[in-house]
Amino acid sequence: MLIRKDRFSTPPSSEITPHSVYLKRRHFMQAGALSLLAAASPVRAVIDADNGRDLSSPAWLAKQVSSAKPFTGETKEALTPYDNVTGYNNFYEFGTDKSDPARYAHKLTTDPWSVTVSGECENSGTFALEDLLAKVQLEERVYRLRCVEAWSMVIPWIGFPLAQLIKQCQPNSRAKYVAFETLQRPKEMPGQRSVFSTIDWPYIEGLRMDEAMNDLTLMAVGLYGEMLPNQNGAPIRLVVPWKYGFKSIKSIVRIHFSETMPATTWNLLAPNEYGFYANVNPNVDHPRWSQASERRLPSSLFSPNRIPTQMFNGYQQQVAHLYKDMDLERYY
Ligand SMILES: Nc1nc2c(c(=O)[nH]1)N[C@H]1C(S)=C(S)[C@@H](COP(=O)(O)O)O[C@H]1N2
Ligand SMILES: [Mo]
């Protein structure tokens, strides 16, 4: 039975059956992006089987997410099913296999959460997530996500333009870049304990200030009408839809404004393969594979669903001007 309650109340966990969850996912799968408007989403409690913790907390965030402004844009592409979006992930803090984040991230504690703002700005300090989100208007946005590994998805995010948060921080005139840092908590992140890991934790990323202020650049706190599952970067992550997925850093705990270009995790690991800009570009191949096309999930051996990759992942109208005098072969 699908339980619908007042959208501002969290149903008791006893009322949540696997079947209701199944129906909800089916609903979104069939709905397609155009009818997301009609898709009211009851807040779902998620209970950690190991210790009975209610992982859908905090309730204030669940409420804010459930009252986000629905998506009104247009996309002809089908949404990637919920199970792919939340079961096929890159989040190396939990392991390098695509199934590792879904398997291990549910143990991550995301409440309470705070974000430290530092560097070239007036309003530096450490802020509770609740305070950071107090003044933002959440909205739903359906974006393509193109991983540098040449697979892609279409995801209905819930978030707000990063520009709204940056304005609250009041960067000064020396701030040319904004850098981000993911949580470092080896106790809850098995990938950070792994002796095989080549990443120098924490995971770090960055944007040029004009990229960060572009209206497409989103800070996401939810997807498919609910709070972000941990494997997708709870409780707050970046989404930069015209760049390869590794720019969209998850579970952010620090935002730093700087005059110089910040270091970024994948660029540090393999500078000849992963640049700072990392704009989706079908004309500039990765040294080890072509970027001309991508595998759109869901895909299988018999139905590979390979489609051409678009310049700036199809967002050229909104972002091409940011790079008009740049040699994109050099600044990959
Ligand atoms: N902290 C952190 N953020 C990360 C990653 C990661 O390993 N750690 N992987 C990136 C990569 S390569 C991709 S493709 C996207 C995947 O986001 P998704 O799992 O929500 O689809 O997250 C990005 N953000
Ligand atoms: Mo990626």
Image (spheres, rainbow, N blue to C red):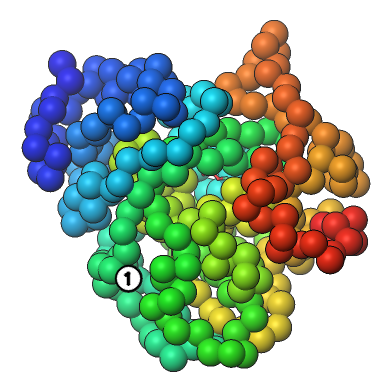
Tell me: 233 left or right of 317. Answer: left
Residue 33 figure quarter: top left
Tell me: 114 left or right of 322. Answer: left
Q: Is residue 249 above or below residue 180?
A: above
Residue 225 figure quarter: top left
Q: Residue at x 67, y 40 (%)?
A: 314
Amino acid type for the residue under numbered disc 1: Leu
Tell me: 250 left or right of 164. Answer: right
Q: Residue at x 48, y 33 (%)?
A: 74
Tell me: 258 left or right of 161. Answer: right
Q: Residue at x 13, y 28 (%)?
A: 4
Q: Is residue 183 above or below residue 67?
A: below
Which residue is the extreme one toward the top? 302
Q: Position of residue 71 (x, y in %)?
A: 38, 40
Quadrant occupied by the N terminus = top left
Quadrant occupied by the C terminus = bottom right
Q: Position of residue 43 (x, y in %)?
A: 21, 38
Residue closer to the observer: 328 or 55: 328
Residue closer to the observer: 150 or 311: 311
Disc 1, SS? helix
Q: Position of residue 51 (x, y in %)?
A: 23, 44
Q: Residue at x 89, y 61 (%)?
A: 327
Q: Residues within 10 Å of mark 1 (few under 14, many from 20)?
A: some
Q: Is residue 169 above or below residue 195?
A: below
Res 145 visible: yes
Q: Is residue 313 above or below residue 193?
A: above
Q: Position of residue 118 (x, y in %)?
A: 49, 85
Q: How many marks?
A: 1
Res 202 visible: no
Q: Which residue is mark 1?
A: 132
